[in-house]
Image: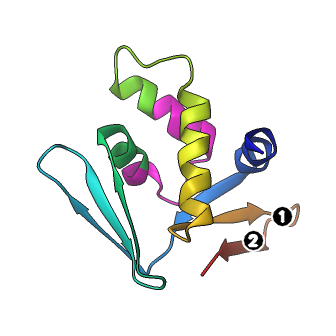
Amino acid sequence: MRESVNAFALDTTPVINPAVVSREGLDDGMVLVNCDTGTALSVNRTGALVWKLIDGRRNPEEIAKAVCRNFNNAPDTVMDDVAALLTTLAEDGFIGYEIKSENKDQTQNTTRK
């Protein structure tokens, strides 16, 4: 499944569900709470950085490149790791994807509830 999600995600822009509340922890991690579903997720320092990079402008590849710039010894699996986290966030309704259409005046925003 990761391959199909990864291919899908590269052509999209992740956007944060406005019903999600985030709080940084003492260990540089973060807790995310989806107020629509009551689902909570704790992410580590890298996951917190990914969350902060989800700004509605960057695609998954750009997010992965930014993670590499922030960590000197980032593993070769960064793109797969970012795609996996984005998949989890999307499946649990923390993010949606803005899908760019060929018509520049139209975009579709999808966030699961």
Q: Is residue 61 left or right of residue 10?
A: left
The crowd level at tag 2 (other Cα within 10 Å; few <14, some 14-19, many 20+) is: few
Whether the residues at callouts 2 and 1 have beta carbons within 8 Å, the answer is: yes
Q: Position of residue 98 (x, y in %)?
A: 68, 65
Which region is colored magenta?
A: 51-66
Query: Which of 65/73 is in front?
Result: 73
Task: Give the SS element for disc 1.
Answer: loop
Which residue was labeled with disc 1? 101
Please report whichever mark, 2 or 1, sits nearer to the chain's N-terminal start.
1
- Chosen colour scheme: rainbow
Q: Is residue 50 left or right of residue 81?
A: left
Q: Position of residue 28 (x, y in %)?
A: 20, 44
Q: What mark, if any, has residue 107 been given in the picture?
A: 2
In the rendered view, tell whether residue 98 sits above or below residue 6: below
Q: Position of residue 64 (x, y in %)?
A: 53, 34
Q: Position of residue 82 (x, y in %)?
A: 54, 39
